Amino acid sequence: MQYTLEEIQNIYHLPLTTLIYRAQAVHHKFQDPSGVQLCTLKSIKTGACPEDCKYCPQSAHSEVGIEKEALLDTETILQDAVAAKKGGATRFCMGAAWRRVPHGEQFESLLNTVQSVSDLGMEVCCTLGSLEQEQANALKEAGCAVYNHNLDTSREFYSEIITTRTFDERLDNIRKVREAGMEVCSGGIIGMGESIDDRLKMLQELANLDPYPDSVPINALIACKGTPLESQKFVDSFEFVRVIATARILMPKTMVRLSAGRTEMNDELQALCYLAGANSIFLGDKLLTTANPDSSDDYRLLNKFGLTSLDPDQARAIHARSGEEASIFA
Ligand code: SAM
Ligand code: DTB
Ligand code: SF4
């Protein structure tokens, strides 16, 4: 099913009550509504990135005085993976500030790390920039189940935010990830100065991928000092909730991840995001380089809401059973 922009606008602009009602209907039909997937992030190669993404504190083009780090070794990363597992995370996501994944010794070390984390019994996700097909295949072979590669915004707004690569290069990389047999995690950032239609066009691109991504991270821009977007105001709460609900309706079986920006959100806004169909978060006090809520606060919140950690196998079983796509216009 290919969505037109108009169809998506019609969903997004529904009265908030109806929008949430529809998102909830889809959520209850296609997901375990009491489950929240808990993922932990680790920056395994930080800073000095040659890309000029205007939102990113790791871009070498920004004036953020970030501490650069070479690729971390397997032992160091494993310590964090073990701690993340003990802390209750089921997925460990490793991020690197690369334009392209390197070859040689660094790639060999990376494969060793992926294999070791996978051996702990955690789902491994990587987000490392552009891949060659052989590298994608090798990552999959080593135990990387998921690859995160965001579209970040609409095709039209893309060059306002990033000039060192194109939107089509991103789509091409997503194809390679699929071809290698990894799950695709792809989403974007809200609050960079883009229009509502830019947000909906991004959702349109994601929902019209065949198949659509297995997970869709929705990040609220963290306006980092020293980046060109440092003066952006935090996104409007209800616009953000509408994006989450629209993503849930368009992609019933995807994990919609409430990603960056949660430190700026109060409990009530996070509850609204769950009501709108979000069912995954990053757990742990750090994202890649910026702060995330303490996991004790997240557990307190999940307890209050009566939500529990989502077992990945159970989620797969629900997806397998949940049959035909929901009719969103019914
Ligand atoms: N370098 C790889 C890439 O760009 O695909 C992987 C790491 S990159 C940091 C992963 C994602 O983090 C970006 O696609 C973007 O969505 C998100 N991100 C980076 N900086 C952010 C910020 N300041 N606020 C919100 N999201 C951000
Ligand atoms: C995604 O969409 N959000 C995460 C993950 N994928 C890699 C990263 C958020 C990064 C926020 C800025 C930072 O901590 O550097
Ligand atoms: Fe580099 Fe990724 Fe940051 Fe862009 S978002 S500057 S590619 S680390």
Image: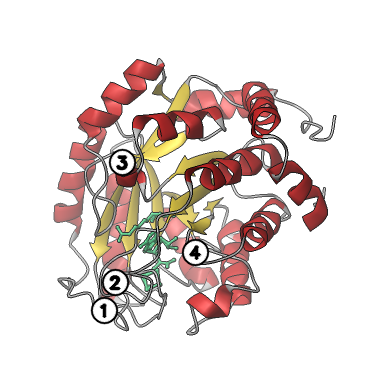
Would you call the spot at circle 3 few (<14 residues within 10 Å), some (14-19), or many (20 or more)? few
Would you call the spot at circle 1 few (<14 residues within 10 Å), some (14-19), or many (20 or more)? many
Residues marked 1 and 2 touching at CB (< 8 Å)? yes
| Residue that numbered label 2 is attached to | 58
Residues marked 3 and 2 touching at CB (< 8 Å)? no
Q: CA distance from mark 1 to mark 3?
A: 31 Å
Would you call the spot at circle 4 few (<14 residues within 10 Å), some (14-19), or many (20 or more)? many
Residues marked 1 and 4 touching at CB (< 8 Å)? no
Residue type at the position of mark 4? Ala
Q: Within 8 Å of ligand 3, the CB of disc 2?
A: yes
| Residue that numbered label 4 is attached to | 136
Q: Earlier in the sequence, mark 3 or mark 4?
A: 3
Residue 71, how many percent across, how many down?
A: 22, 68
| Residue that numbered label 3 is attached to | 119
Q: CA distance from mark 1 to mark 2?
A: 6 Å
Q: Earlier in the sequence, mark 1 or mark 3?
A: 1
Confirm whether residue 215 shows in the render: no
Residue that sits furthest to the right in the current view: 330
Query: In the picture, residue 129 is in which quadrant?
Result: bottom left
Q: Secondary structure at mark 2?
A: loop
- Mark 1 vs mark 3: give the one in front: 1
Residues marked 1 and 3 touching at CB (< 8 Å)? no
- Front one among 309 and 61: 61
Residue type at the position of mark 2? Gln
Q: CA distance from mark 3 to mark 2?
A: 30 Å
| Residue that numbered label 1 is attached to | 48
